[in-house]
Amino acid sequence: MISIDRDTPTRDDVHRLLSEHLADMFATSPAGSVHALDHSALCAPSISLWTAREDGSLLECGALKLLDSPTGAAVHGEIKSMRTTATARGRGVATLMLRHILDDARNRNLEHVYLETGTEDYFAPARRLYARHGFTECPPFADYVLDPNSVFMELRLS
């Protein structure tokens, strides 16, 4: 059975998976277009990180970053650091994680969930996953700017 629980980027296997994620992002996109967070940034109080595990083995990680509104209250979130281990790909684990993150966002009464992903073919499975769950392309959000290497997506929750 797969379980999804809060976790920390400092846990050894999570740290390795996130390092792999960062390495792939820099290998796939120009450095100025890499928006993946490093391990220390994922420890920020505004970020919740979860892992999916089966019999203790790490399968997936994903995070939700709360975005400040002009009033200071978090009404929007951003999906960060979605990464599936090579051995778990194709098993639907990313779908389970995405649903978990969206359920958490709804429980927090967030109005929108956003994300940024790449335009390269490497990111096509991610773009398909998000589109299947209702995400649509949108303009840059938060501190992002237009970038030919980025696709910005949003899901309205309210």
Image (cartoon, rainbow, N blue to C red):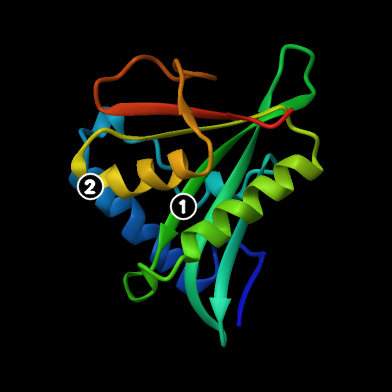
The correct choice, above or below, for 35 with respect to 104 in the image is above
- Mark carried by residue 94: none
Mark 2 or mark 1, earlier in chain? 1
Q: Nearer the viewer, residue 132 or 139?
A: 132
Residue type beneath disc 1: Met
Indicate left or right for 94 with 31 as reference: right
Q: Quick one: which residue is furthest to the bottom in this view?
A: 55
Question: Where is residue 104 shown, x and y percent of the image?
Answer: 73, 48
- In percent of the image, x 68 and y 39: which residue is there? 46
- In percent of the image, x 80 and y 44: which residue is there? 107
Taking the image as drawn, is residue 37 in sight? no
Residue under pointer 1: 82
Indicate left or right for 15 with 2 as reference: left
Q: Nearer the viewer, residue 44 or 102?
A: 102
Location of the N terminus by quadrant is bottom right
Q: Quadrant of residue 89?
A: bottom left
The correct choice, above or below, for 51 with respect to 111 in the image is below
- SS for tag 1? strand
- In percent of the image, x 32 and y 28: which residue is there? 150
Q: Nearer the viewer, residue 134 or 38?
A: 134
- SS for tag 2? helix
The correct choice, above or below, for 19 with respect to 44 in the image is below
Residue under pointer 2: 122
Asked if the residues shown at circle 2 and circle 1 are in contact, with their CB atoms under 8 angstroms apart, the answer is no
Q: Quadrant of residue 84?
A: bottom left
Question: Where is residue 149 shown, x and y percent of the image?
Answer: 25, 27
Location of the C terminus by quadrant is top right
